[in-house]
Amino acid sequence: MPTVLITGANRGLGLEFAKQYAADGWSVIATCRNPIGVGELGTIEGDIAVYGLDVLDQNSIDRFVSDLDGRAIDVLINNAGVYGPKPVKAADVTMKDWTPVMQTNAMAPLFIARALLPNVEKGARKLIVNISSIMASIEQGSAPSEYIYRSSKTALNMVMACYAQEIAETGVAVVNFHPGWVQTDMGGPNATLTPTESITHLRASIEKLGFDDTGKFLNYDGSPLPW
């Protein structure tokens, strides 16, 4: 039975990932900051375990890794993320608003990936998947607003492009995905995809990944996106 680990699994895309992988018979490790009162995540049937994990707290990360006790992970999905205040133009940006978004979206995924790399190396699939955004694309996604979120996801792409090269000798592939514009709290009700549609496409694309895909930035349907 393959194992998937999903951060930020208590809502939105993370919750849908957990639902679909559990329904397909995967062993699911689902994390969120507070594992008590997780709502719908706690009702998912199947082989699923919910852990408390604060991706911004190194002590929490260390405890979580210790609790896993070397367990093999086939697919690690760095899904936890925040948008920050919106809309934001240059005159509105503050250090107080910008810093936690950069920490959560760009820095924490690397800290999680490096902490769990030994676990992923033990897995059969050897995949680290990061949820990015088309808004990270300088070619396609630049616009005169949303400095905070856009820059955090662009930074994530660069961080993971570097990490893919650094760990290439391990055989672990590192891939960034745009999930589409999805009807979540972040995407809003006017988005073009439901969570079910987005994650169905993403899972199909993830299933096709191999080491040749490491370092790529892909759309949810598996097509390449410009940096």
Image: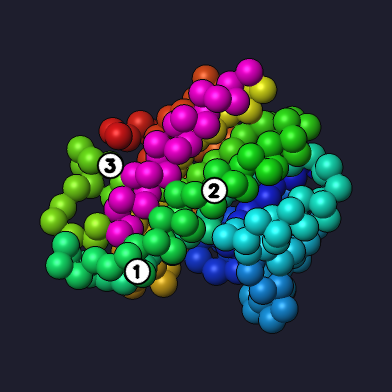
Callout 1 secondary element: helix
Give the main secondary structure, helix, strand or loop, of the magenta stretch.
Answer: helix
- Amino acid at circle 2: Pro
Distance (Cα) linking label 1 and label 2: 19 Å
Specify how the rendered protein is coloured. Answer: rainbow
Tell how many labels: 3
The image position of residue 41, as x and y in percent, is: 66, 70
Write the residue at 24% across / 60% down: 146
In the picture, measured across the screen, residue 162 lies left or right of residue 15, that is: left
Residue at 52% over, 28% down: 164
Q: Residue furthest bottom?
A: 37
Q: Are marks 1 and 2 in contact (CB under 8 Å)?
A: no
Q: The N terminus appears in which quarter of the rendering? A: top right
User: Mark number for residue 109?
Assistant: 2
Please state which amino acid type lies under the numbered disc 1.
Asp
First reached walking from the N terminus: tag 3 or tag 1: 1
Residue 81 is at least partly visible in this image: yes
